[in-house]
Amino acid sequence: MKPKISIIVPIYNVENYLGRCLDSLLTQDYEDFEVIAINDGSTDNSLTILQEYAKNDPRIYILNKENNGVSLARNDGLLKAKGEFIGFVDPDDWIEPQMYKDMLKVAEEDNIDIVMCSYTREFGTHSKEKMFAFPERCNYFDEEVHKRILRRLVGPLNEEVANPELLDAWGTVWSKLYRAELIKNNNLQFVDLSEIGSNEDTLFNIHACYYAKSFVFLNKPYYHYWRANNTSITSKHNPNLVNQFGKLYTRMESFLYEMNLGENYKIALSNRISLNTLGLGLNTISRGTNPSIIKQIKGIKELLNNNRTKRSLEQFDLKNCSMIWKTFFFFAKKRLAFGLYMMLISIEVLRKTVR
């Protein structure tokens, strides 16, 4: 019999965390699922750990392949998925026992294409729930999926820009359960990170939510997102990220044009580009690769003089920002690299210390 849910887990060198992840999956309150574990060319003991778990639980299917990155690993998993619904879990994360049972119940009872939950960020020494200022459950149907979810995935509008830290909180794939036919009928796939650098989840969800007829948000933190893994791709300096984000924006712009989406979407994307000054700036000041302050400030100047970034910042409206963010984006608008550098250093310290 086909499983009800296929859970896709891309795996690369996570021997210290993999057991915790698999334990959380295999002890779910709901049992009718398969785990498609893609070993993406791990050079540590990840494959051995996988094989030990698979011996004891036939729900684990191992796909062993050469390393090609998380996007292509997930795409391989999608090709193998047999379930009516598809979920994604990253191998250094874990989930609550009732996550898929509760999300599946909503999806089946109300015929929902995508169900999303909130999550808790795990820092090793402390935990912090990602706060969404929404009711316990939000339902979106037909055009509301576009207006409330798709547009938000493209970028923020009005008062939404006041919280740059929420820019991609809606874009993660691991917080969602998808109806499989939504993905397969529309040939949805992940774009290789070697092209776009990051945000492959958000780009995937932009396409998914364009085709979705229904979307439910459950404001419950079923998922645990491990932020203490210093070897993860999201924690490493990427010297090509500005150029790669340019390709990401081009893909988003092309999609907006092809689907004839309105002016609000263009403004939202422009705001995304402006807010990404924060993430790109933090990537630029990574001390592991740019120990020289002069080099870091030079990198910030190059970022601020990027034509696309410069155009977006010129149009960016500061009126909904807090005083701190008004100051940050004032420096960015005026291309004051040293002032922006000092703020980025402060933000980086707060990211590591605030509980």
Image (cartoon, rainbow, N blue to C red):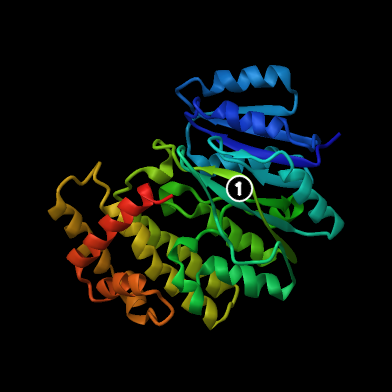
The image quarter containing residue 318 is: bottom left
Q: Nearer the viewer, residue 105 or 60?
A: 105
Relative to 306, 187 lies left or right: right
Q: Residue at x 75, y 58 (%)?
A: 113
Query: Percent x, y for residue 337?
Result: 20, 66
Q: Secondary structure at mark 1?
A: loop
Residue 189 in sight: no
The image quarter containing residue 344 is: bottom left
Q: Residue at x 74, y 72 (%)?
A: 142
Q: Residue at x 37, y 52 (%)?
A: 351
Residue that badge 1 annotates: 174
Query: Percent x, y for residue 104?
Result: 79, 49
Q: Quadrant of the N terminus?
A: top right
Relative to 203, 329 lies left or right: left
The image quarter containing residue 316 is: bottom left
Classed neighbour count for the residue bearing mark 1: other residues with Cα under 10 Å, few (<14), some (14–19), many (≥20): many
Picture layout, residue 151 above or below residue 116: below
Q: Nearer the viewer, residue 292 or 321?
A: 321
Q: Residue at x 56, y 38 (%)?
A: 93
How many numbered marks have been drawn onto this rendered protein structure?
1
Query: Percent x, y for residue 126?
Result: 48, 42
Residue 286 in sight: yes
Query: Percent x, y for residue 79?
Result: 67, 41
The amino acid at mark 1 is Trp
Relative to 82, 49 lies left or right: left
